[in-house]
Amino acid sequence: MALGICALVSPTLGTRVFVALLVSQINVLHGGARGQAEADCRPAVQHDGPLGEVPSHQGMRFEGSQPDVPVEGEGRPTPRRGERALSNIHGEVARTDDIAEVTIIKAPPTSSQTLRQVLALGPGYRRRRRALLVPPMFVPENQRAPFPRVIGKSHVISADEQGSHIFRLTGRGADQDPKGAFSIDQLTGEVTVNRALDREDIAFYQLQVSTTDQAGKVLEGPVPLDVSLIDQNDNRPVFTETRYAGEVLEGSPAGTTVMTVTAWDADDPNTDNAALRYSLAKQSPDLPSPSMFYIDPEKGHVVTATSVGLLDREALPTTQYELEIVAKDMAGSDVGLTGTATATITIADKNDHAPKFTQSLFQATVRESWRGAVLTLTVEDRDEVGTGAWRAMFSILGGDSDRSFEVHTNPDNNHGMLSVVEPLDYESSAFHSLLIKVENEDPLVADVGYSPISTATVYVTVLDVNEGPVFFPDPMAVTRRENIPAGSTVAMLNATDPDLLQAQHIRFAVLNDPAGWLSVDPVTGMVNTTAILDRESPFVHDNTYRAVFTAVDDGSPPATGSGTLVITLEDENDNAPYIYPPVARVCEDAKDPNVLVLGGMDRDIDPNGAPFSIQLAKQPGLETTWNITSINSTHSQVTLLHRLQRASYLLPLQVTDSGAPPLSRSAQVTVQVCTCRRSRMDCSRADYAHSDLLVLGPALLTALAALSP
């Protein structure tokens, strides 16, 4: 089998006709003839006679498979409608027949070249067996009734063979879903479409055609039948988003890309039906220019189309522009379908405006000793509110060597708040002149003309107020021995009035004296005792006693200051020691002679306390029954020298501290001798009055002995 392609062009209409010649097992007398066309059309055939012999075309008959492309006269295919058609052309003479597949791209009223000229066939051809040929077919989508409509023939049948073939059509669209879209005439092979089809659902159908004899035996095929749906412009462009949002920095040069919009069309992308072009239909607002932006018609890039000077956010009537964007198919022609979307473009701010004080001089008046805000420094900035290009930062350049002032930004209005952080002293300086600078958080944009750094001068006038006297030192610390007699001088208070420019007098008074031990001379500030100072008093903590005094001037109104006097009391040996515990129990048959451990305590402190000396009182016979030995500086061991009968015994003792001179105290301890059985102690017959009895074992004695120096 051989395939040849022939392009025929009408000399008068310029119509292109593409012819594919399919020739199978045919004896053709081929000559050198060619049609009246620009291309040489020579079917590839076998040749029986000498080359160059041109046979006669008389008696050749032609038949086309497409009803829309009939063959007239000497084999001129004449399409009746449409811009594209394809047909199987059957040419037959007495001994020869052949089939050509003809595709007409632009249908002319008539073709200037005949199929006889294209095929260059003569009457000397022998007949051959024909193979099944099914040309591709085309169906416009969205056709209207009536149906069915013939779309072509699958085969050309000679008159003597009609009725000997039965055509079968199978595949998707025939006997598979969508079933029944296409059908074939069993006898003639005409293929029909039976309902309107949508290319956007299925754009291409591949069916199979075969022929059988009356008994059902397959004679030819199956061969593929390709049916393509011709697209109609029945779908509008659709944007991927209904609303786009973008921003561009103010001052950007023309051509700066803001965003890219994209639309798609469900029609055939290989046709103009899906060839989209973008345009801007509306800009709102249209000031200062109705053409602030431009869109690339093919790529959908939205770019700035105005000068840098016009794209000034602070000069524009709005910071947001809304664009109505249109996408049109048919490459933007008037007959194209359209889709629309909205784009919002925000003109973003950059720091191209420096902050400025609303005035160059501010004045404030503040009372001395005041802490807190004293003045609002108003500024203005044309940049976007709330951004780093708008937020102000303040700093004091001069006039605050003592660091008495601070400036903070009010986040609500961007103004500066001048505050006094260290109280001002009228007597030191009644006037302050501050130089304050303001700048933005973000740096200014380069290559923009700015005014000099914005500064302002602040005059602060300090008002004199009657300040309270000030004690020096405060607190005042002194050391005195306890037990000094009443009327003794403790301290001389010192207070001065800071109002140096005013002649004022100060009077002292006691504000808080917890124990009532002190008095103060109102004029001189001399502090004397009114009672004995006792270091062991509950009003004394860590050997110190605190009292608060006031100093009041005679200003109008009077002002008061306060100061603290701290008295450290030195200890005297004025408290005798005592011993514990007062009662002890012991079993009458106890094998351990150690009865109890006695401890000494003293309210005085070193060196007037421990070590303590605990001894038996000077009574005859005690040393024959009891013995006391020292364990450490505070405790001693009492030992029973022989067993005692069940009873209560009073043990007289004497304890002495280490003061100079030392103090002693006499004491007695009750020792109960009880009956002990099975770890139970029975002291019911013993005469005792206290129930908190303590018996100490050897382990505790060992621990106490380890504490001795």
Image: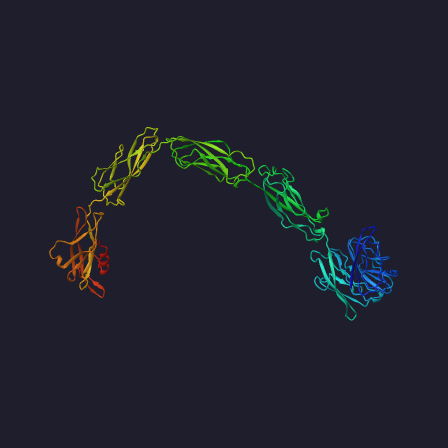
Question: Furthest-left residue in view?
Answer: 620
Left or right of residue 624: residue 505: right
Residue 591 position within the rendered picture, expressed as x and y whole percent measured from the top left: 19, 64
Number of marks in the rendered image: 0
Residue 235 position within the rendered picture, expressed as x and y whole percent measured from the top left: 69, 52
Report the front residue among 464 and 333: 333
**Residue 117 vertical placement versus 534 (above, below):** below
Report the front residue among 495 and 466: 495
**Residue 24 vertical placement versus 634 (above, below):** below
Residue 331 in sight in this render: yes
Q: Residue at horizontal 86%, vertical 57%?
A: 74
Report the front residue among 445 and 167: 445
Left or right of residue 325: residue 464: left
Residue 369 position within the rendered picture, expressed as x and y whole percent measured from the top left: 38, 34
Residue 153 in sight in this render: no
**Residue 662 vertical placement versus 219 (above, below):** above
Question: Furthest-bottom residue in view?
Answer: 215
Structure colour scheme: rainbow
Left or right of residue 531: residue 336: right
Quadrant for the N terminus in the image: bottom right
Left or right of residue 82: residue 362: left
Residue 635 position within the rendered picture, expressed as x and y whole percent measured from the top left: 21, 54
Report the front residue among 263 and 539: 263
